[in-house]
Image (cartoon, helix red, strand yellow):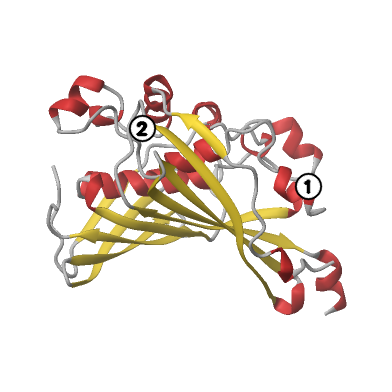
Amino acid sequence: MPLDPALIGRRSSELTVDIERGRLRFFAKAIGQTNPIYSDVDAAKNAGHRDVLVPPTFLFCLSMDVPNPFEYLEELGIDPVSILHGEQAFEYVAPVCAGDTVTFSTYISDIYQKKGGALEFLVRTTDVTRDGELVARMTSSAVIRNQAAKEAS
Amino acid sequence: MTGTLNVGDTFTLEVPTITRTTLALYAGASGDHNPAHIDIDAVRAVGYPDVFGHGMLSMAYLGRLLTDWVPQDRIRSYSVRFAAITPVNVAPTCHGTVLDVEDGLAHLDLTMTLPDGTVTLRGSATVATEQD
């Protein structure tokens, strides 16, 4: 069943997260990032940063830090196994560092179809704020494969 | 360590082989515990031959290409389209090219490619050419 465009604007619960140095060190190791500004506080400060720097894609990981990151899909009756991560975008307004507390506010920003409804796109936008000021904006596009529509077309 | 930002400039990052250990570490560090990336029994049960890489791990590698190229606070925007999956035990290559420079902003074209030529990620970034 196609998603109702009236869902555009629907908001998920806000999420507030403390950014931890240890988690950033682990993330740097996992992605092979050896520049110490991403893992060592002294190196980060010597390079002019307030603390260990949050790398370009890490805010997405924090936004998934909820008991069930796919709750929004299940609420819409979508099986998380049927979706693919189609696109991901970041806009950066201000650097974010360990020690910061950030809030994620997410809403459905677009719904559209391709291939006669066989592919549906659910686009969500997340404003990331620190002390009420926007520091980054993320846009994530999930592709829903509708087998029934594909067979009918 | 940083590169220049003139039209036609290119930058490359060779990623070491993405092993099962890489995927396990990324699952833990990123918080993405989807079994598709770490549990071969779970993926075989739904008909896939093997686990595959997290799309956001690939985006993190292209992000490393960017931050090796320019200081991170000059990156204004960064986006990708996930075009194909990245199997386990391959060593991809990240490429960036400066497409144009206008009004103090460089527009970069980004790709991640497997050794067989498959493009797994297509992306773009906008980067300030000067420090604020």
Please state the horizontal and vertical placement of residue A153, each as a whole percent of the image: 82, 80
Residues at discs 2 and 1 both on one chain: yes
B55 sits to left or right of B34: left
Q: Which mark is residue A32?
A: 2
Quadrant housing residue A112: bottom right
Q: Which residue is mark 1?
A: A74
Chain for disc number 1:
A
- Which is in the foreground here, disc 2 or disc 1? 1
Q: Is residue B114 visible?
A: no
Closest to the observer: A153 or B44?
A153
On the image, which quarter does residue A19 sit in? Answer: top left
Q: Amino acid at mark 1?
A: Glu
Chain assignment, label 2: A
SS under mark 1: helix
Find residue A134 and report its horizontal and vertical position in percent. 39, 49
The residue at the point 75 percent across, 53 percent down is: A82
Image coords of residue B127 (percent x, y)? 24, 59
Q: B45 left or right of A40?
A: right
Image: A30 above or below B125: above
SS at mark 2 in the image? loop
Gap in angstroms between the C-alphas marked 2 and 1: 34 Å
Q: Around disc 2, counting alpha carbons within 10 Å, would you say few (fewer than 14), some (14 to 19), or many (20 or more)? A: some
